[in-house]
Image (cartoon, helix red, strand yellow):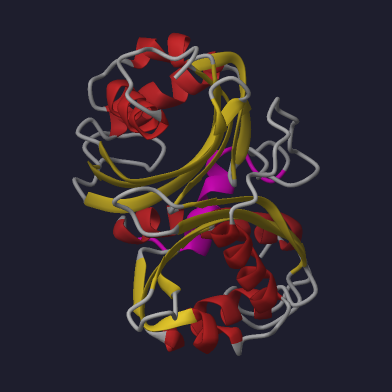
Amino acid sequence: MKGFDPKFVDFPDYIIGITREIWEDRGIATLHQYYGDDIVVRSPASVVIGNQNVIGATMATLAEFPDRELLGEDVIWCGTPEEGMLSSHRIISTATHARDGVYGKATGKRLRYRILADCHAIDNQINDEWLIRDQGAIVRQMGWDPKEYAAGLIEREGGPEACVKPLTPHTDQPGPYKGKGNDNAWGARYADLLSGMMGADMRRIESEYDRAVQCEYPGGLTGHGWGAVDSFWMGLRAAFPNAAFTVEHVIGREDEMMCPRAAVRWSLWGKHEGWGAFGVPTGAEVYVLGISHADFGAVISGQPKVRREFTLFDETAVWKQILLQTGA
């Protein structure tokens, strides 16, 4: 890989390798090497600019969760070393809440949660990132409800005026990556499927998903079958029935020894004006950043369908936006 450290055999090795080096091997100082000075890191909870702020947040997390592991499940990527590459990678993280920190007094709770992140890298450095942790799973394992946690977070951060503002089109900051992905057929197919469901065509679930599909959704939820898929996507869309659904980035890949896969980064931007995944409609204007991965396969010859789906958004960031506008 031109411009990258030769110890990495390919881009997935780079992404998984530096993740382990930074977090598990305690090579936090390597962030000076692997992250750009002016990197933009967007999460649903906030926008962080600058490598020094990333280093501070990394150290705070490791202080609170000293045994944290990050297990790389997949890296779905596009681009070239010369022009830059975008990885959409999926991680299972395990950690013990061993010390006091952002999540309050140490509880000793053992956590397991998923992360999806899109990272742009060129010349051995990441300079643009979209990061989603399953905060719903984290806080539930701590014994909290996501809405309750969001309310407490607003209070701990100094109240509605002083608290950290979640990511929205108003708070987002531009980064160097301007790409939209690649033109692989699997990515296009999955993006079209998500757009169809968000356009209220739920019939596509039975035609596009395998009947035994495994699905992994926010809150650490695992489901199987068409009903689980319908329940999740229907619940989300019903809560924001008129929100604009936008496909932000699309990657499809076919790699040796791997099934065809797709990664789609998407957003919902509009009012909470329906009964669905977020309860009583409030009219609050909400931005939902989501990332979805899909694995395709054909159990019956000639009928490739979605066999596994992984989708994340941050429930606590949605509730924080609702509470900041309603005061409830």
**Image point (44%, 75%), residue name:** 304
Indicate whether 165 appears above or below 257: above
Number of numbered discs on residues:
0
Asked whether residue 155 is drawn in magenta, I would say yes
- Looking at the picture, how far across and down is residue 174, in whole percent? 75, 30
**In the rendered image, which quarter contains the C terminus?**
bottom right
**In the rendered image, which quarter contains the N terminus?**
top left
* Left or right for 166, reference 31: right
Residue 239 visible to an observer of this rendering? no
* Left or right for 68, reference 35: left
- Looking at the picture, how far across and down is residue 94, in whole percent? 24, 45
Taking depth in this image into account, of 104 and 118 the one nearest to the observer is 118
Taking depth in this image into account, of 51 and 211 the one nearest to the observer is 211
Asked whether residue 73 is drawn in magenta, I would say no
Q: Which residues are magenta?
A: 143-160
Residue 286 visible to an observer of this rendering? yes
**Image point (36%, 63%), residue name:** 220
Taking depth in this image into account, of 68 and 164 the one nearest to the observer is 68
Indicate whether 304 appears above or below 66: below
- Looking at the picture, how far across and down is residue 71, in whole percent? 26, 42
Q: Main secondary structure of the magenta part?
A: helix
**Image point (37%, 81%), residue name:** 301
